[in-house]
Amino acid sequence: MSDRETVDFLGSVPLLEGREEADIVELARVMRRRTVQEGELLWRQGDDAREMVFVVEGVLSASLQLPGNRSVVIGSAGPGEAVGEIALLDGGGTTMSVRATETTTVLALGRMDFAALLAPLDPPAFALRRRLASLLSSRHRSQLRHLALSLGGDVDPPAEDAARTFSELEYCGPPDGTYLKRMATFHDFDSLALWGFLTSGRYARCPAGRTLVAEGAPSTACYLTINGAVEKVLARGDRRIRVGLAGPGKAFGYESLIDGQPSPVTAVTRERALMLVLPREPFEQLFNGEDAVSRVFLDVILRDLVAALRQALRPHARLAASL
Amino acid sequence: MCRILAYLGEPLSVEHLLFDTDNSLVRQSYSPRMMNTFLNLAGFGLKAWDPTSLRPEDPFTYCATTQPSFDRNLRFISAKLASSCLVAHVRGVTYSGEAVVADTNLHPFHFAGTRVVLAHNGHLRQFARMRYSLLDHVRPELAQRIEGTTDSEWIYALVLSQLDDPYGLPEANELADATANALRILRKVRAAHGIDTSSPVNLCVSTGRAVVATRVSFDYGWYPPDDDMLETDLPFVSLWYAIGGEYTERDGHWQMTAGEPPRSVIIASEPLTADFSTWLEVPEYSMLTAELTPAGIAFDTRDLDV
C-alpha cells in the first residue's frame, strides 16, 4: 500500500470524513500498516489497550469470553470500519477479543496519537467527537437490537407514559456545587466550562417507577442523573432485560437526539431521581457547539456511551453463558 | 466497605480461594481493584464446610482482626482445608476513631446452634437512628445474642428471624425468601425514620448447602452533604460470579472450567483474577441462589424488588 493509497483510504473512512487532506497526510505518517493472518488474534479481551485499527481489507470478528473457556462472536468489522476505540476512550481493558476471520490488512493508530486527535478545541476534533458519538450510538443500538431479539415479541408501547412523565416533572434549583465537583464524571473538567454545561438545562425531580424514555418512540430530552438511579430496560410483555443503570453522573435518552431515530431502550426511574434535563434545543446547541462547554458535554456523552456499551455486554454474556 | 467471597461446589483448597489468584480475597484487603482507594483493614473472617471433617454440618471458623496477608496461621490452615462451601469476608471501615475494630464485629456472623451464616458488603447509613426499631422484627432470643456494634449483625438476626425455624437447615428458596423479607423490613423501618440516603446491602447468606447473595442498595444515588464515603459509594457496590465445572489453574491462569450442569460456583465482590473476562457481573437489584443437589449446582438469578 503506497503512501498515496493510505491517504486515499483514510480519506474514505467515515470516522475521519471531512478532515483536511493535510491532516490526513499527517495522520497517515503516524499509522502503522499490518497484515493479520486468518485466525490470528489482534488482542485478547481485557488486555491493556494500545491501539485502535481501521480495516483496510478483510474482516475482523469480535468475540466475548464466557466462563468455561468458551466465547461468542458479537460482531464483525469490514473495510473502512474501526475497531478498538472504546478502550482507548475510557482507559479500561479491551472489551472483546478481536481476530482476523480471513487475511486482513489494518492500519493501526496508537493510544497517544488517538488522544492527540481528540485533544484540540478545533473544528476537526469536534467533528471527530460527534462522529464517535454517532458511531458508538449506532453500535449501542445494534447491541440492544440483538438483545431484544432474544426476548421475541413486539415492543410495548409506553410512549404516552414517557410524555406524561416529562410534562409532570417537578423542576427545582441546581444541586449543591460541592457534591457535583466530587462526582467522578466531572473530576477532569475545567470548573468554568463544567459550570457552563451544568447550567445549560433545568433540574427536575422524578419519583421512582416512572417511564422517562420509551423504546420505539422519539426521546423528548437527554437526561443526566445527579441523584438516584434510572434503569434502562428492554421489555416484551412480561419478559425484560435490564441493560444498564444510570446512577449519578450517567446520562440517558440521548441516542434518539443524536441520530433522529426512535429510542432503542426504555428508561424508568428505579429510585427517586434528581436529573439535569436537556430538551432537544439545548442538546443540539451543546452537541453542535465548538467551545469549551460543548467539549465538556461531548466528553460526558462519549464516556457515557462507552460505559453503556460495556454495560450492555453484561446481559450479552449472561445470555450466551446460559445457552 | 468490605469484600465478600462465597464458594459452593466440589471440595476446593481454601488456599486457592484466599491466596493463590492474582486478585484473591486476601489481596483485596489491601489492594481492591473496584473500590477506589478504600482498603479493608479491619479484620478477616471465614466459615468453611469440609465434608470430611468431624460434624461436617458445622463450618470451620477462623477470624482475626489482624491483616490476613500477614496471618501465617490463616495461610497454614488454608493449605490444609478443602471446602465444599465457604463464606469469607475482609472488613473495611471508615478511617476514624468511631469505627470499632473488634472480634465481635467480624463477619460472617453465626449464632451458636444455628445453621445459617451471613456476611455483608455495604453499610446502612444512619443505622443508630433505626437500630432499636428492628427489635419489633427480631426474635428476642436472637436479639439477645447480638454482641457487636455493626449493622450487619442486626441484619443477620433479622434474616434468621424470618425463617420458620432459625435453628433449622433451610433450603435455598426459604433462605432467599427470608433474606428478601428482611430487606423489605429494613426498607420499611428506614422509611419510618425518614432515612433516605444510599445504603448498599450486598449480602451473602449460607447454610453450607446453599448460598444466597444479593446486590442491592436502598436509595442508591442519594448522599448526605459532605459525606466521607461519597466517592466510594457513587458506583453501585459490585458483585460477580463464575460458574462451571471446577476452579483450577491452567497454564498459569486460574479459571472456571466448563461444566453442564455446573458443579462449582464462586460469588465475590470482585473477580479473583485481574483478567475478569470469564466472570459475569451480577445485575444491580438482583439476588443469586445456589444450592448443592445430587445433579450438581442448582443456580438462579432473579430481580430483587424490595
Image (cartoon, helix red, strand yellow):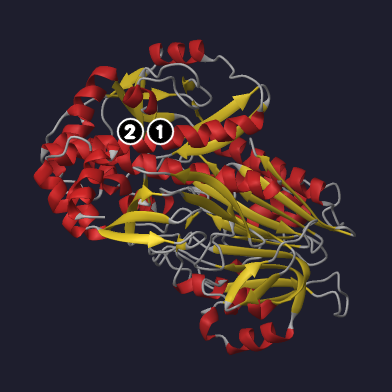
Residue A138 tag number: 1
Asked which quadrant contains residue A50, the reply is bottom left
Q: Amino acid at mark 2?
A: Ser
Q: Quadrant of residue B43?
A: bottom right
Taking the image as shown, residue A171 lies to the left or right of residue B107, namely: left
Please tell me which residue is depicted at 48% across the width and 59% down the height of the picture.
A45
Q: Which mark is residue A134?
A: 2
Q: Give the spatial CA distance, label 1 vs label 2.
A: 6 Å
Mark 1 secondary-structure assignment = helix
Label 1 is found on which chain of the structure? A
Tell me whether circle 1 and circle 2 mark residues in contact (CB < 8 Å): yes
Q: Nearer the viewer, residue A99 or B74?
A: A99
Instruction: Report the front residue among B184 and A62.
Output: A62
- Judge whether A202 appears above or below A9 on screen: above
Residue A166 position in % (x across, y down): 40, 15
The part of the image, by quadrant, that contains residue B120 is bottom right
Q: Position of residue A12 (x, y in %)?
A: 25, 39
Count of numbered labels shown in the rendering: 2
| Residue A260 location (% of width, % of height) | 35, 20
- On the question of residue A249 being in view, the answer is no
Q: Locate the N terminus of chain A by quadrant.
A: bottom left
Front-most of A107 and A243? A107
- Circle number at residue A94: none
Q: Is residue A297 above or below residue B47?
A: above
Decide if residue B25 is on the left or right side of residue A171: right
Does residue B20 sit above or below A231 in this rendering?
A: below
Q: Name the amino acid, label 1.
A: Ser
Looking at the image, residue A279 sits to the left or right of residue A45; the answer is left
Question: Residue most toward the right?
Answer: B294
Residue drawn where x is 21% and y is 55% of the image:
A2
Q: Is B24 displayed left or right of A30 in the figure?
A: right
Camera sees residue A303? yes
